[in-house]
Amino acid sequence: MMQGDAMTTLRRRQFMAAAPAVLLGATMLPACSQVSDPESYESVAARIRRADASVGMDGSVLGQALSAELVRELVRFATLAPSSHNTQCWKFAQEDLGLTIGPDVSRRCPAVDPDDHHVFVTLGCAAENLALAALAHGLHAEARFDAVRSRIHVALSPTPAQGSPLFQAIPARQCTRGDYDGKPLSGNELKLLERTGTSNGVQVLLLTDRTAMERVLAYVIQGNTVQLADPAFVKELEAWIRFNRAAAVRTRDGLFSVCSGSPSIPTWLGDLAFGLLVNAKGENDKYARQLRSSAGIAVFVGDAADKTHWVEVGRAYERFALQATALGIRNAFLNQPVEVAAVRSPFAAALGLPGLRPDLVVRFGRGPTLPPSLRRPVNAVMV
């Protein structure tokens, strides 16, 4: 037997010997309330995602400078946007009477996102949240992408404070990576989602026909199979997984396993389980089940494949996701067909979009909530 095979066999035996006891203990953890601990996962999540918009200052009285307290609150709401692997690949800076949002290149994911497409979509999502939060605080936000500096400039000016269902949905929005109930949405709900997900330079295709959804699934499986055969992709993905509450609270980023319906387990066991149990067949079966439990699929497409349009795609998706949340509708990404370059063009052609680059693939439907993901402190993302 080759040395590598022997090591794999040893790891498998270690995992099989230890997993039952640890997994049994892990399944019992949710029954023990940790809310009283101020640094428990639940307490940290509650602080990060608190819904109040009051910071003791109405932005309509904006003078020569924004208060530090108001800036922190706007950034907190902005960081509740989604990001690939929950890397939170953004940096915020105060600039005169506004803010800038730029990429944090130290949090790039070159294996899954070699051209930083997801990074700039993420910045667009954050900009949309910031604009909605600013309006709730009495500020009009005018966002403009600076292609030279690769930054979003958000100019702020006084306006009457106005909350909205989308703003109120920001703390509750999540990518719900679980099974949905399979029930269709109403025509009015679909029209509302389509309207909020469409903007200048961005269109959204809503697919609810089961035959069309199965065609998309075929590309999801094709892309996922390619990704899981790539050691660099697998290594990068595992690096962003947090297998237990302690690890998630320590970093406040990444993909907490419980948020995807998996148990909370020790990191050493998670490393063994990931290497031995995460494979194309199992993941493809999971995605097939999840897609078939969904009410439909949304595909976001920008008019051009450049950073300006990627930012706008992010803003359009975030409005879609917030509107869905306001309606009690869950959503989650199935981006494999747009992440694998060899799959992307055939996928576009199958959608009737030759020559365009599909940007995001999102399944949606009604289902249970899962634990919310965490975010890093505001001072960690301010420069």
Image (spheres, rainbow, N blue to C red):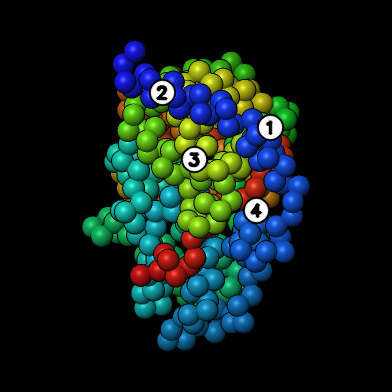
Q: Residue at x 54, y 84 (%)?
A: 61
**Residue 127 in view, yes or no:** yes
Of the image marks 4 and 1, the number of the one nearer the N terminus: 4
- Above-or-below relation of 353 to 195: above
Q: Is there CB contact under 8 Å for labels 3 and 1?
A: no
Q: Residue at x 70, y 27 (%)?
A: 182
- Between circles 3 and 1, the one closer to the viewer is 3
- How far apart are the two marked residues, 2 and 1, measured between alpha carbons? 36 Å
Q: Is there CB contact under 8 Å for labels 2 and 1?
A: no
Of the image marks 2 and 1, the number of the one nearer the N terminus: 2
Residue that badge 1 annotates: 180
Residue that badge 4 annotates: 172
Q: Residue at x 63, y 59 (%)?
A: 40
Of the image marks 2 and 3, the number of the one nearer the N terminus: 2
Q: Is the residue marked by circle 2 packed among few (<14), some (14-19), or many (20+) residues within 10 Å?
A: some
- The percent position of residue 350, horizontal first and vertical second, equals 43, 19
Q: Secondary structure at mark 4?
A: helix
Q: Secondary structure at mark 2?
A: helix
**Amino acid type indicated by mark 4:** Ala
Of the image marks 3 and 1, the number of the one nearer the N terminus: 1
- The percent position of residue 240, horizontal first and vertical second, equals 44, 44
